[in-house]
Image: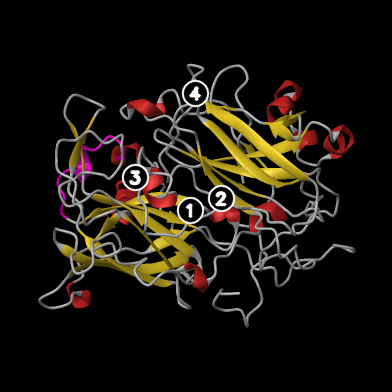
Amino acid sequence: MPQMLHHLRETPSQTAGPYVHIGLTPNFAGIDGVYPADLGTAMVNGKTKGERIAIAGRVIDGAGEALRDCLVEIWQADAAGLYPSPSETRGSADPNFAGWGRCPADAATGEYRFETVKPGCVPFPDGRLQAPHVTFWIVARGINLGLNTRLYFGDEAEANAADPILSRIEHRSRVRTLIAERVGDGYRFDIRLQGPDETIFFDI
Amino acid sequence: MSTAGSNSSPETGAFWPRDRAWHPPPLTPAYKTSVLRSPQRALISFSNTLSEVTGPVFGQNLFGELDNDLIHNFAKPGESAQGPRIIVHGRILDERGQGVPGVLVEFWQANAAGRYRHKKDGYLAPLDPNFGGCGRTISGVDGGYAFRTIKPGPYPWPNGVNDWRPAHIHFSIFGSGFAQRLITQMYFEGDPLIRTCPIVNGIRDPAAIEQLTAPLDLAATIPMDSMAYKFDIVLRGRRSTLFENRLEGN
């Protein structure tokens, strides 16, 4: 018998359920006084560098209806393309930028919205630059394992065309499901869980 | 910066691939809500980039004194939540068996009667005026964490005509990279409802269900005060970058 590897198995996921707000956004859920504020509501402050943008949209189910009980988290680089994380070894990110945001869908409309800055470019492992993008993570009742996708920007056509991930997507008609179009000072990004326009989800 | 282990090199390696057969699949028809909320196309895979191997950190200054005490963090002064008092403790590990320090762990649950403090919960069981149902903590240098709460009750839910959730506590865990992000539920050893639950049974491998079942830990109890349950949580492992080539200019 060779030696044992002693690797563990990842803890299996379970759905976030209908009451995810109690745990992750208790003030939004009306549970006041436990935490001063819900985490992830402020990604920027007055000193944050970069172009201010808003990202908004809905998560839509297979019947075409917006999920009004989902929760969306995003993670992105700062305007210079640096992540505010210990695992970022290329430099120090903007100390006035959180990089991470959390937003529950509006209980009436299903709309989520983040106030952030447009991210800079981040390299792919082989050194090529990726197009500016925002990582999304979506959880909700009925979603057994959190869904990962990315938002790319509609006004970055050149960078998107050269992006190492976008350019390897076999079904070219699906690439547009990852592209947020500019509307006013922000970008609109609807996420479709099923159907002919199902958003591309990633196994990262 | 609060992350324990700040004297050691930061983790920068790619994560081990996720074993999706170990997790419940997206479509589990007995859990009806999954039917219209499960993507149907194949996921697209790519090697981790900085966007996946980095992740947010949360400082120690975030935490209030009662954040990890659900018995008291919503209660009126001098009062406490009703129900069996328990301690839940364990370690946040990765698949290499190493403790993951400095990560945010959030938890939420129903009260002892099986009722959530949420406008969408219509179960006739009573609310506890001294129980909010949320808490959070940060893992220590060895990945250890603990909190104090009351044991939640089981409750009926609208799925089949007579489905009951086993008693459970929801967990949300960050890792050192955003691709480790995980939400799960902890169940209690010996609960007969575990094996009847359509949400639990979305998991195919009985060993994976065991991994979500916390044993009673008499050694961690506080005599005349609290019972204890142990729940270790394993996040994805990541490659060591020790011998990996670094590209020029990278």
* Chain where mark 3 sits: B
* Picture layout, residue B172 above or below residue B244: above
Instruction: Name the residue that disc number 1 marks.
Output: A38
Residue drawn at 78 percent across, 54 percent down: A125
Mark-to-mark CA distance, 3 and 4? 28 Å
Image spot of residue B153 (x, y percent): 17, 49
Same-subunit check for callouts 4 and 1 = yes
Image spot of residue A141 (x, y percent): 39, 35
* Chain where mark 4 sits: A
Report if residue A106 is visible in the image.
yes
Q: Amino acid at mark 4?
A: Asp
| Residue interval drawn in magenta | B190-199
Task: Check the picture and name the quadrant holding the N terminus of chain B.
Answer: bottom right
Residue A41, label in figure: 2
Q: Circle 2: is it few (<14), some (14-19), or many (20+) Cα within 10 Å?
A: some
Q: Residue B192 magenta-drawn?
A: yes
Is label 4 in a helix, a strand or a loop? loop
Left/right of residue B120 with respect to residue A122 in the rendered view: left
Mark-to-mark CA distance, 3 and 1? 36 Å
Left/right of residue B108 with respect to residue B150 in the rendered view: right
Quadrant of residue A178 within the rendered picture = top right
Mark-to-mark CA distance, 1 and 2? 6 Å
Sequence-wise first label, 4 or 2? 2
* Chain where mark 2 sits: A
**3 or 4: mark nearer the eye:** 4
Instruction: Name the residue that disc number 3 marks.
Output: B205
Residue drawn at 43 percent across, 54 percent down: B172
Left/right of residue B87 with respect to residue B20 in the rendered view: left
Q: Amino acid at mark 2?
A: Thr
Badges 1 and 2: C-beta atoms under 8 Å apart?
yes
Badges 4 and 2: C-beta atoms under 8 Å apart?
no
